[in-house]
Amino acid sequence: MFGRITDRGFTLAEMIITLFAGAIFVMLSYNVLTAQKKAADAQNQYINAQQNARITLGALEEELRLAGTNIDDFNGQPIFLDAAPYQVTFNADISNGVSGVLGMTTDQDVPLHDGTKYTIGIFPGEKPGALQRYNNNAETIRFTLDRNDNGIVGREDRYIETQNPEDYALYREENGERNDIVGYGLRGREAYPDGKFPQPLFKYYGDYNADGVVTLWGDNDNDGLLSQTEIAVITAVPRKVLDKIIDIEITVEAESNVMEAGFAGPHSIPGDTRNYRSVVMTSKVRPRNIGTSSANLHPCGDSPGAPSGLSAVDTPNDNGTTITLDFSGSNDELAGEEDITKYTVYRKRDGDVSWMCIGSIVTKATATYSMEDDADTPGGGPEIGESYSYYVTAWDCRPQESNPSNSVGPVQPVANGPAPPVLMNAYDTPCDAIDEITVVMAGSADDLTDGGNVSYYKIYSGQKKTGTILSKALIGTIPADGSNIYTFKDNVNGNMTGVAPAAGNYYYYMAEAIGAVDSIPSVSSNEFSGIYYSGTLSSCQITNVDDFPDDNGESLSINWDASPSEDCLPNDVVCYLIKRKAVFESDWAVIYSVTASNASSYNYVDTGLQRGTQYSYCVWTSGANDDVPSNEMDGIPLN
C-alpha cells in the first residue's frame, strides 16, 4: 500500500495571512529606510553648511592677514578704507608679479558702507598728487554681503537663488570690480525668530584711544564682548580711527540651503522655526603690516600652552537644557608669550565618532573662563538622556592651536524644575468696556500629577514693534490648583504694574511655573507674540500655514481662528482680509477677502505661487469702524 498523494494548494486563509505578514515586513522595511534617508539628508545638510563656513573663513583669514602688504606708505595710501560689521575694504598687493592685478586708478571707485564712494585721495593723509594710481600697485580689496553693490548691506542683498530666506553670499571685489563669490548660505544681520541677533561677520579690535589699550569697537561696557543691545546699534569704525585697527575677528555662520521640514534649529520659536542646519566658525586675524605700535607688538612664537582644569556640570534650575563649562586659560595669556586670542570648545556625544566645535571664546585677560552649552549652541544644545564629553584648545595670534585641555565627561543634563506651561492664546477681550487682553495657558505637566509640584505661575508681558522687544515685565501670578487651563486678565486691575494695554500696540506674553517644594522656576514657556490691541475689535489668530499637497509647489493653505469679537452682540466683524508678501517684497498686498460667518475657524488656499519661495501672511479682522492685524506666519510651497 502506498500513501495517498494530494495536490491540494494553499487555502484562502493561508494566503491572506502570508500576504498580511509580507505587507507588515515591507512597511517596516520602508520605515527603516525612510528614517535612514532622513538622517543621511540631515548629515549632508550639516556638511554642506560646514564646508561653506570653512571655505569662507579660510579665504577671509588668508587675505585679511595680508592687509597693508606693499602699500605706498610714502604717499599716504591707507590700509583700511571701510570696516563695517558686514563688509571690509583694504589695500594690499595680493596678486603681485608680472601678471598681477594693478592698483586702483583715479577713474575707479569702491562703494562704502554709508552709500558713498571711495576714490583715491579723499581720505585724510592721502597725498597721491598727480599719480593716476598709487605706486607699488596694491589692489583695493572689498569683502561684502552687498549684492546690489550700493555699499549698504540690507535685506535686499539676500541670495535668493536658494530656498533659505535668510541666505546671503559673500562677494570679493578688486578695485571696485566684482570677481568672485567666496561663499553663500551665510547669515546676515537680521534677528533670529526669537529676537536675538547673530554676531557680526567682522569685529574690529584697535587702539582707538591711542593709549596702548586694545578695545573692541562697539563694546560700550568694555567687557570684551558684544551684547545683544550693542549688536543692535553697532556702527562701522569711523574713518578717523581706521588706522588704529589691530585685530579683526571673523564670525561665519553658514546655514544649509535646503529646508529640513522636521528640524527646528537654535533660536526657533513656536510658529517660526529655523528649518536649516547651521554651523558657526570664528577666527581672529592680525594683519602683518599694520604698524609697530606698542599695542600691536606680540611675539606669536611657539604653539600656545593648553588650557587646563576643565570641568563640566549640569546647570541647576534649568529643566535640563544646559551644561556649564569652566576652565583655566592658557599660561601664554597672562604670562609667557601673552599672545592668546581665543579658546575653542569641542563636544562629543557618547556613541559619536567625531568631536564638534560648539563655540569660541575671545580672550578677556582673565585667569578663568566659563561657557554654557545650551540651546544657542551651533547644532543645538544638550538633550536629556544623552551623555557628552568636552575639551578646550587655545589659539595664538599666528594663529596656532594648542594641544587639547583635559577631557571631561560623560556629563548628562538633568531635568530639574517643573515642566513649563504652554501659552495657547492671547487676544483683545471681546465685548468688554475696559482695556484688557485675555491670556489662555495650559498648566505645567507637573501641576497635574498627584500632589502637584507647582506652587504658582508667573506671567510676563512685553511690547513689540517690528520684531524688536521694547520692554518685558512681570505682570501677575496665578495660584496653581491642578487645572488643565488657566486664564489671566491683563487689565489695570489684574496687571500688578497697574498699567493696562494701550491701543495701537503689539504685545507678547510668556510664563513660568514655580516649584512647590524648592521654588525653582521652570524654563520659560513659549512666547505668544504679535497680539495687536485696538481697544475695539479682537484680532484673529493664524494657526498654521501649510504646503498644499500634490500641486507641484504652487499653493499654501492658510488657517486661522475667528476673532472672538464674532461672539459679541452686535457682531461688528464684517470680513477677514488676507495679506501676503513674498520674501523679496517689502510691502503687504491684500489677496483675498473672506466674509465673517460666525464660524470658529476659517481657511483659504493661496494658489499660483512660486515653488520654493517663502511667503508671509497676516489676516486682518475688518469691522465697520476698525481693522486689526493677526500674528504673522510664513510658509514655503514645495510639494
Image (spheres, grey):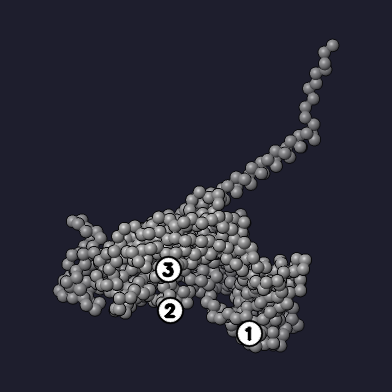
Name which residue lies at 74% across and 81% down: 568
Identify which amino acid the numbered label 1 is placed on: Pro
Q: Mark 3 or mark 1: which comes first in sequence? A: 3
Whether residue 41 is situated above or below residue 468 in the rendered picture: above
Q: Mark 2 or mark 3: which comes first in sequence? A: 2
**Residue pointed to by mark 2:** 221
**Residue pointed to by mark 1:** 501
Determine which quarter of the picture holds residue 314: bottom right
Q: Mark 2 or mark 1, which is nearer to you?
A: 2
Q: Residues within 10 Å of mark 1 (few under 14, many from 20)?
A: many
Determine which quarter of the picture holds residue 517: bottom right
Q: Please tell me which residue lies in front, 503 or 47.
A: 47
Q: Residues within 10 Å of mark 2 (few under 14, many from 20)?
A: few
Q: Are marks 2 and 1 in contact (CB under 8 Å)?
A: no
Quadrant of the image containing the C terminus: bottom right
Name which residue lies at 36% across and 59% down: 304
The reply to whether residue 202 is in sight is no
Identify which amino acid the numbered label 2 is placed on: Asp
The reply to whether residue 28 is in sight is yes
* Mark 2 → mark 1, Cα distance in angstroms: 33 Å
Q: Please tell me which residue lies in front, 234 or 564.
A: 234
Name which residue lies at 56% across and 60% down: 382
